[in-house]
Amino acid sequence: MSTASQAKGRRSLFDKKIIRRAAIDALVKLSPKTSLKNPVMFVVEVGSVLTTVLLILNRFTHHGHFRFDLQITLWLWFTLLFANFAEAMAEGRGKAQADALRLAKSETTAYLVSKSGAIEEIPSSQLRADDIVRVIAGQMIPGDGEVIEGVASVDESAITGESAPVIREAGGDRSAVTGGTRVLSDQITVRITSNPGETFLDRMIALVEGAERQKTPNEIALNILLAGLTIIFLLAVVTLQPFAIYAGAPQTVFVLISLLVCLIPTTIGGLLSAIGIAGMDRLVQHNVLATSGRAVEAAGDVNTLLLDKTGTITIGNRQASEFVTAPGVSNDQLADAAQLSSLADETPEGRSIVVLAKQQYGLRGRELAHLNAEFIPFSATTRMSGIEVDAIGQATPARSIRKGAVDAIAAYLLAHGSKLPDAVRDSVDTISRSGGTPLVVTENGRALGVIHLKDVVKGGMRERFDQLRAMGIRTVMITGDNPLTAAAIAREAGVDDFLAEAKPKDKMDLIKREQADGKLVAMTGDGTNDAPALAQADVGVAMNSGTQAAKEAGNMVDLDSNPTKLIEIVAIGKQLLMTRGALTTFSIANDIAKYFAIIPAMFAGVFPVLNKLNIMHLHNPESAILSAVIFNALIIVALIPLALRGVSYRPMSAAALLQRNLLVYGLGGIIAPFAGIKLIDMLITTLHLA
Amino acid sequence: MSLNGWLQIALFIALILLLAKPMGSYMTRVFERRRTWLDPVLVPCERLLYRLTGVVPTEEMRWTQYALTMLIFSAATLVLTYVVERLQLLLPLNPQHLAAVAPDLALNTAISFTTNTNWQAYTPETTMSYLTQMLGLATHNFWSAAVGLALAIAFIRGIARREMKTLGNFWVDLTRGTLWILLPISVVFALALVSQGVIQNLNPYTTATLVEPQHITTTGADGKPITTTVTTQTIAQGPVASQEAIKMLGTNGGGFFNANSAHPFENPTPLTNFLQLLSIFLIPAGLTATLGQMVGSPRHGWAILAAMTLLWFVGVFTCYWAESQPNPLLHNIDQQHSLTQPGGNMEGKEVRFGIASSALFATVTTDASCGAVNSMHDSFTPLGGMVPLVNILLGEIVFGGVGAGLYGMLVFVVISVFIAGLMVGRTPEYLGKKVESYDVQMAMLYLLIFPLLILGFAAVTVLMPNLGLSSLANHGPHGLSEILYAYASATGNNGSAFMGLNANTHWYNYSLGIAMFVGRFMMIIPMLALAGNLAGKKIVPETAGTFPVTTPLFTILLTSVIVIVGALTFFPALSLGPILEHLLLHAGNTF
């Protein structure tokens, strides 16, 4: 599993292996079939071919200025190679990840259970959907499927990178298993749910490799803008030659193509696909798998986040925080009864009561076996749990202890001829209002007091919700609690709104309502009953531990099954869009400086007065044009790290973000090339290249 | 530059900014069919018109239907004008017995007035009869402006509407724009002009005897000089005031006389000049307020008006500054502004208007797609003359033509929002409407047609010595400016001429005709397609994460995008035209 965890870990941006592979891929990508997909770079390629042909022709006919023409031609090819390299780098990083995943996909033996019950050994690659297989401890699960019988602990680190084993069992929300993971204990029977080549792992590999990569809607729109700009600049350059002829200063093809390549948005054109691939890659590094790039973009657009209370906003389970006694009952009495009734209670709440009794009152755990007691488990009809301690053979009298929700206990007491004291009822209300869950404890028909079960809000949630609000995202807490409790927790956590006593249908209605207002909704879910809502939401993140149905319905799967990650997913989506916008703005802003380098250089020979426009004081016309072309090529390389990492992102309002990014990438984009071109000009003048 | 000049300019823009909101609110009421104080008179007229034409005013149109109806209407009125021009000798109201207009010129002129361009390749007083002027040309001044208004309102509806397929009813928008907005203001404005001395009659031309006979020497066919003595002058007459009002208000610009607003019968006093300036910007400025009101974000309207005002100011400052500079070729001559002389460059300018008013007029008429002139742009300094050219090349969106300026500006808004909108980490949104690939496609198509026509035609023209260059009065960079200006003016539907170019030739009449036609209608179609697509979208509610389109930052962004896109497209051509001419002038060369 070491390889898989390596894949998860942060790779250095410039891994030598990846660079080497990317350099080769950059050459392969010169094939017109590939470059046609990118109109901007295709124009560069056509230009490069044209100058190359002309360079050779001129060599034979002794025309042109070979040293200059050769350098221009070479740098045009470099521009193209750099752009290809950027894309190959991004793909290479994905491929490295895919290779690691492939190791987990190695062929295993599947134990196929035939209808008659006989077991047959077949290679895992021959498994089809609806085949039944048996997997025992130590074996690899041969394909994606659903546990239909048994319970087992499974090591899923090959997929998640998380080394702690997880429990997978038939029925319920933890029934899905993934091919390539290993059963550590026990044995399970699995119904295979996918055909060869369509498994989760296959999809994941295809995704990170970029093999299935389709352009996202936003990328298509941006490509249209870039193609449009390219045509406009093509027009400006093509018509410049007649004007130049009219002015008596016709230009060489090399100079015109240089101008064209400098003007068309090669920076963003060259980095666009790398940005998209890298965005997907960042998501995978966060252990989130998206079914499409579209989902990642939608994450950036989300207006409303639906967050389940339990596990997302609060720590998974309620914990006992306090014992509130009824009048005339001592603390020890209540604690003792509470502890006793919870000893056999294996629920997290039950355990937390035992822990509280030990911490606050020094009550040690007792062995039920010594007590001659009978544990009464919680049932849906009584809505109580408790314990009956027999008096026979004991120094103590018989005890009948019950704990449960206030209504259930009140009814229970009434049946035993007593009443819930008002003081206890008051405590119950106080606890409810504060967002806690009250559990009333009775012994032998008498109310002893209340256990305060408290929802513990995870640390730092309030700050995160504040950040989301600054970004214009509304958070809605979804909970099965009553409105009173829900309101209290919502207040404590700082969410914008809550949906109490939520049933799956309520969740669905809420999503539809928000969408009708034009909002985009994101949610997480794991159960089968979440599936319709996950499908309806614009961004539906299914937990990997969830059911197959949930995973199929959502458009992302979180391999760590961490519902809080929705917030990171939104950030990744936003960062992806921002990186595209920033580099587009930068690319267009760059053109101003290039004009001031190239236009005077083109015409200063015939009209020396135009040197006044040479505000950078570039050495001579050839060095000026060369500098602009070189800058244009090198800036692509210089921005590869930015394209792969994404622009830095901190949550803030759109207005503040716009101001910051316009300053950095807009104004910066205008100024940077002036300095860059001047520097390159000084360098090539020193080296006597022009 | 003088304080007096700047005060005029300041007063002008202050009044425009003051009038924008009331004008905009009135137009909102008109197009949303709410009550106005003119209803008692106009509603019966409107009903009668609908009954006569069979228009069902409540019938809504999709963008395709809206576009088709607009095209049919324009084509029909184009044919009407062509026929009137060709038959004018047979028709009444032709006291000078002017001959039928030549086919290429008649077509060019019909296109020119239908497209709100008012490019005039002819001398009106010797070419067009009174009937042609009134029935063939002045009617288009109303219609083409009303079409522009209707289109702008359709575009605004596209932004404002939520999940709807339609943009309104073209006939209703056309009728209400004409009856409620253009006609009443024109009537009042024409009367104001008459009070200042603008003529309004159907008389034959007057002949006056010159106080001092003129001797004119020309070279005859045999190469010998011939001297003729001129003792009389023909003074053209006509129904000028009625046409003058709508010429300015509708940003048409086609003069009743060749001298346009420099002619004393069209523009006699500084007051009429000021009123004419105001009337050019009145509706375009008001439309920004209409936009704000109809989309429910008045501050967005103001942000756009601010961007327009900013670009206007840069233009007028540059032009006024350039025209106030002493001519570098006149050494040892006092060219400073003083009480006794205007200083600077007075060539081609009317003495009664002076430099400030001429520079302001040149800027305003080209910011908007008006094209009326009160001075000869050809005689401006290279940089001063570059201002009107650049204004047109930016797409005439600085206030812009009636309607056309606003929808042109809104296409730039869509592009700006798309480029910068990604930087806030969301799919770009414009007032809650997501800007997607179809929208970008249509917006880019709109932006592309413009340089394609201007640069394409200009490039072909400079390569043709006989058809293209022989019409030039000046060569070198100034000649290039003249050709660029002609195609920019035609494509942008401005209609002002730089002069110095004889455009009444087959090549220019046809090529400029195509430029005008395509520049108007082929840009309207993608614009309406964009509007129709926007209308069908949901509106995403505004949050802190929404791209701000109401802030000063947005104004700066929008202005930058306009300038950068415009500059990047046309800078190479301009560098060989006015920029080179300016640099050469200071090195002692003229053209």
Image: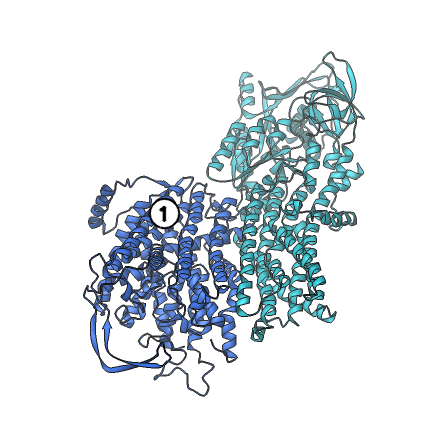
Chain colours: A cyan, B blue
> Within the image, what quadrant is residue B289 found in?
bottom left
In this rendering, is residue A203 above or below B551?
Answer: above
Q: Quadrant of residue A162?
A: top right
Looking at the rendered structure, the number of numbered marks drawn on it comes to: 1
Camera-nearest residue between B528 and B135: B135
| Of residues B126 and B36, the one drawn nearer to the viewer in this rendering | B126
Q: Quadrant of residue B532?
A: top left
**How far across and down, in percent of the image, does residue A5 sit?**
77, 39
Residue A681 place in picture, x, y as percent: 68, 68
From this view, report whether residue B304 is shown above or below residue B174: below
Q: Is residue B330 visible?
A: yes
Q: Residue at x 26, y 48 (%)?
A: B35
Chain bearing mark 1: B
Q: Amino acid at mark 1?
A: Leu
Residue at x 26% of width, y 40% of height:
B54
Q: Which of the image's four quarters has the C terminus of chain A?
A: bottom right
Q: Secondary structure at mark 1?
A: helix
* Residue A494, x across and y down, in percent: 55, 43
The crowding category of the residue bearing disc 1, from other C-alpha atoms within 10 Å (few below 14, some 14 to 19, many at least 20), is: some
Q: Is residue A562 above or below residue A45?
A: above
The quarter in which the N terminus of chain A is drawn is top right
- B407 displayed left or right of A159: left
Q: Nearer the viewer, residue B241 or B501?
A: B501
Residue under label 1: B71
